[in-house]
Image (cartoon, rainbow, N blue to C red):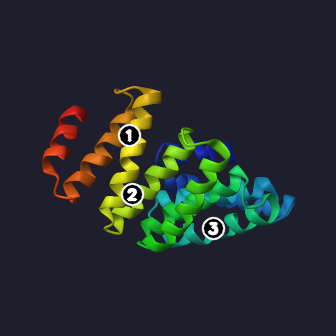
Amino acid sequence: MGDLAVTYSRLGEFKKAQELENVVLEKRKQSLGDNHPETLIAMGNLAYTYKGLGEFKKAQELDIVVLEKRKQFLGDNHPETLRAMGNLAYTCRELGDFKKAQELEIVVLEKQKQFLGDNHPHTLTAMGNLASTYSNLGEFKKAQELYIVVLEKRKQFLGDNHPDTLRAMGNLANTYRDLGELKNAQELEIVTL
């Protein structure tokens, strides 16, 4: 049932997914308890679906619980804890709480660098997420610095034409535009066509 709910979610059929995920979450709580990893996975899946439905407050409530329990049982540095922290940061950003998102994303980025290294895809994703939050905060120079690093590393490890490289290029172009550096923005935008 949980797998079908995830499939519905990935297909964009969030209402169907939500119905199933509510049942899955309740059954897991009853049979495994509130703190079991499978219960937390079900909770995270439901939070993801709420995001797809645009119900970010409900998602945030679940994201907070998942993060607290991941920290409690796995510690601050576990990959699942960092994933939960990143999920909550995304939800905060969608709710317009950019300062909270920034706080969380800085922690995620620092820990990803520490445990995975500067070039790992998860580290680069965390860097891009923080850059996006800086843009939302109007801190375009900080965003630019991070987006440049992400783009250089994406090119280095994935090549110029990989979708992640092109996305990084587009993000940097948007930041150049925000900074009024229209020539730089134009050059990157031509490449991404």
First of labels 3, 2 by sequence position: 3
Q: In the rendered structure, find residue 132 and report the number of the disc placed on it.
A: 2
Task: Answer yes or no: is residue 162 visible.
Answer: yes
> Residue at label 3?
62
- Of marks 3 and 1, which one's residue comes earlier in the chain? 3
First in residue order: circle 2 vs circle 1: 2
Name which residue type carries label 3.
Leu
Q: Nearer the viewer, mark 3 or mark 1?
A: 1
Residue at image coords 34%, 26%? 161
User: Alpha carbon of mark 3 to alpha carbon of mark 1: how far?
Assistant: 33 Å
Label 1 near label 2: C-beta < 8 Å?
no
- Is residue 27 found left or right of 145 in the rendered image? right
Q: Could you say where residue 1 lies in the image, as x and y percent from the top left?
A: 69, 46
Work out how far the residue at label 3 is from the one at label 2, CA to CA, in angstroms. 23 Å
- List x then y, in percent, for residue 117: 61, 42
The crowd level at tag 1 (other Cα within 10 Å; few <14, some 14-19, many 20+) is: many
Disc on res. 151: 1
